[in-house]
Image (cartoon, coloured by chain):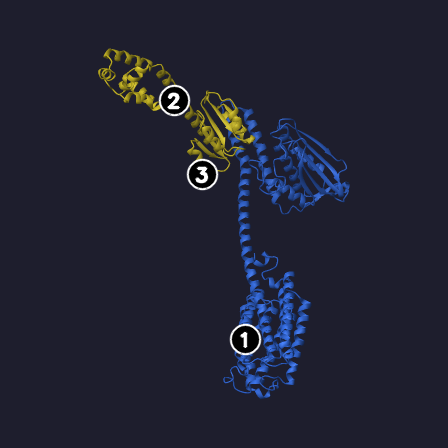
Amino acid sequence: MSKNGSIVFVVDDDPAMRMSLESLLQSVGHTVAAFETARDFRMAPRPDLPSCLVLDVRLPGQSGLEFQREIGRTASPPPIVFITGHGDVPMSVAAMKAGAVEFLTKPFRDQDLIDGVHRAIELDRRRRAKAAMLAELRERVSTMTPREREILPLVAAGRMNKQIAQALQLSEVTVKVHRAQVMQKLKANSVADLVRIADRLAAIEPEAKMDGTSI
Amino acid sequence: MSANELMPGGLSPLASPPARSQLRLAVCLSALLIGALLVAAPYARQPTVNTEALLPAYASAVFVVELLTSALLMALFSVHRSRPILLLAVGYLFSGVMAVPWALTFPGVFDEMMPGDVPQTTASIAAIRRLGFPLFVIGYAVLSDRKFPPGSARRIILLSVAGVLTIVCLVTWVIVSNDDALPKFMIDARNVSGLWRFVPATAIGLYSIGLILLGLRRRSMLDIWLMVVLFTLMIEIMLISYISGAIRLSVGWWAGRFYGLASASLVLLVLLSEATRVHARLALSVLAERRARQNRLTAMEALSASIAHEVNQPLASMVTNASAGLRWLAHDQPRIDEAKAALGRIVLEGHRASKVVTGIRTMFLKGAQEREPLNLNDLIETVLAQCETEARLGRITVSTALANDLPHVVGNPLQLQQVITNLVDNAIDAMRGITDSRRLHFATQCHEFGEVLVVIADNGAGLSAIDKDRIFDPFYTTKPDGMGMGLMFCRTAVEAHGGRLWASDNEPHGAVFQFTLPASLAKPNDAELVR
C-alpha cells in the first residue's frame, strides 16, 4: 500500500502514545509528523500535501476541541481524527459536529484508526482536488473580457446567437466570435461542457451569474 | 452514624457538662431572686383580702408547668433511658398532679364542693407535696446513671405515669376520708399550728441535702438548674412559713407562691430552650453531613476518573504499540527492528501502568504499618536506578551528596520509596520546559534533634507561580492530566512516619523539596542484622 504524497500529523502530549501512533501509522506506509502540543504543530511548516490530523482531546494548555475550532477558521484545515482517554458522548458529538472524521476512545482498534486516517486523507485529497480545479477555473475566467463574461451566462442558458445579439445589441457575427473565445478560454469542448463549467462558476462566484440575469 | 457521634456534646446539652455561661446565668438568677426576696420581706405579714380567687389560677399554672416539665423530661428519658431523669420526671409529675387536690381542698376556694374538715386536708396535701419533691430530687442526685435496656422506655413511661396517678389518687382519698386522723397542722383556715413548724424545717433540710448532693455532683447543666430550683423553693418556704409568719394568703405567702411558680417554670424554660438549640444543632449537623457526603462523592468521582485515565493511558499505548509491531512483522519483508522497538515500548508502558497501580495501592494501603530499619541512601539509589532512563531521556544531570554515616530510619520501605519516586517524578516534569542545563540534586544529612534530612532539588519551573500551601492538598494539580494526589500522599506518608515535608524555592529557579524523618536509635550494624 503506497501512501506517497500524503502526510499524517499526530498531536499527543504523551510521549509513549505519540511514539506508538507514529510506529503504527508508519507500519502501514504513512509519512508521519508527530508533535507534543498544538502550538508545536501550528509552528511547524506544513507540506502542501493531502493530510490528516490525529489529535488527542486532552492536551496541555489548549484542549483538542478548542484547537479544532481554531484551525477550522484557517484556510484548508486538515480533517481531524480524534482520540480520547475517556469516551464522552457530548464531547464526541461536539467534535463530529465541528467536522471531525472519527472519534476514537483509547485503547482503540488499530484498524479503526487506520480506516479513519485513510478516510480523512481521501477527504482532504478530494477537497484539495476540488479546490485546485476551482482555482484553475477562476484562473481561466480571469482571462475573459467583460463582454465575454456577459455572453457566458446567456450561452449557458441555451439562448441562440440571434437572441444574444439582440439582447446585447451586437451583430450576430460578433457574438459568434465572442462565443468561440469563451469556449476556448474555458476549455469547453461542447455547449454541454460550457453549461457545466458555468454552473460551477455560479456556485463559487454568484456575481458571475448575476451579471447574466440582470439583462 | 447516630446524632450522638455527630456532635461532641452528645444529643442533649442537658446531659453535657455545664457551660460557663449557663453557670453565670444561674448565679445571676439566684441573686435576682434574693433581691426580690429582700424587697418583698417588709410587707410579708400583711394579709390580703379575697385573693382566694387567684388560687385556682395559680394552681392550674403550677399544674400545667410541672406537667410540661415532666413531659419534656420523659422525652429526654426516652432518648437517654437514664434512671435519674426518669425519677425527676416522676417527681415533677407527682408535684404537678398533687397541686390539683391541694387547690380543690383549699379553704374558701371550692368550699361547697369538698366535704370534711378542710383546713387539715389542704395542709396535709401541701406537706406531702412539699416534702415529696425534694425527695425525688435527692433520688435523682443519688441514683447512678445506669441505663434501661433500649426499647423499654415507652413501657416504663406509661407505667410511671399510671403509678403516679394511682398514688396521688390514693393519697388524696386517704387524706380526705380520714380527716380526723390527720395531724393538726392548722388552727383555722388561715393560721398554722405549732405542729406545722416541722414541715418547713424538714423541707429546708431536704432542700439543703439536695443542694449539697447536686453541688457535689454537678454532672450536667440540668444539675445546675435543679440547684437553682431548690434554692428558689427554699426561699419560697422561708417566705411562706417564716417571713410571712406562716399566715396564709398574706403578701409574703403570695410572694412565696410566685417564687414556687418561677422555680417550676425555670426547668421548663431551660428544657425548652435546650430542645430548640438541640434541634438547631441537629439541623445544622445534618446539613454539614450532607455537604460532606457530597464533597466525598465528588472527590471519589474525580479520583476514579483520574485513576482510570492514569491506567488507561499506558494501556492504550501498549495496545497501539502491539498493533504496530504486528503490522511491521506482517510486511512482505518483516521489519524486525521496528517490531523490536514497539515491543520495547510495550515493556516500558507495562512498567508505567504497574507503577500507577502500585502508587494507588500504596496510597490506600492501610497496613503500611510494617516498618523496618532502613537506609534512606539505599532507597534513593533504588529510585535513581528506576528513573535513570527517564532522566537520560530528559537530558537531566543527576548529582548526589549522600551522607556516609547516615543513621537508619524506621519506616515502610514501599511507602518511603513511593514518596521519593513521586518527588523525583515531579522534579523531572518540572524541568521539561527548561532550556538551560537540567539538574537534579539529592542530598541526605543528619539533621538537628536526631532527625535525618532528605533534600531533592531541581532547577525546573519552580513553585513561584503556584500556591505553595495548596500543593499538598488533594486534587490540587498543575499538570494537565495529574491526579493531584502525589504530594498529598507524600506529606501524609512522611507525617505518618513522624517526619515533616516542605517545599521552598531554588536559586535561580526551581523547587527544593525536603523532608525529615526521625533517626532510629538502633545502630546501622544492628539494622543490617535485622534485615
Of the 4 image quadrants, the one containing the N terminus of chain B is bottom right
Q: Amino acid at mark 1?
A: Tyr
Respond whether the residues carrying marks 1 and 2 are from the same subunit. Answer: no
Respond whether the residues carrying marks 1 and 3 are from the same subunit. Answer: no
In whole angstroms, how far apart are the C-alphas of marks 1 and 2? Answer: 105 Å
Mark seen at residue B111: none
Q: Which residue is mark 1?
A: B58
Report the chain shown in yellow.
Answer: A
| Residue A175 pos. (x, y %) | 26, 13
Crowd around label 2: few <14 · some 14–19 · many ≥20 (10 Å): few
> In this orientation, which residue lies closer to the viewer: B177 or B248?
B248
Count of residue discs: 3
Using the image, name the chain to which the residue with label 1 belongs: B
In whole angstroms, how far apart are the C-alphas of marks 1 and 3? Answer: 74 Å
Q: Which residue is mark 2?
A: A130
Crowd around label 3: few <14 · some 14–19 · many ≥20 (10 Å): few
Respond whether the residues carrying marks 2 and 3 are from the same subunit. Answer: yes
Up the image or down, B109 lies above or below B470; here it is below
Query: Colour in which chain B is shown?
Result: blue
Q: Amino acid at mark 2?
A: Lys
- Any part of residue B328 in sight: no
Which mark is first along the chain, 3 or 2? 3
| Horizontal side, residue B112 vs residue B474: left or right | left
Q: Which residue is mark 3?
A: A90
Q: Amino acid at mark 3?
A: Pro
| Residue B475 pos. (x, y %) | 57, 42
Using the image, name the chain to which the residue with label 3 belongs: A
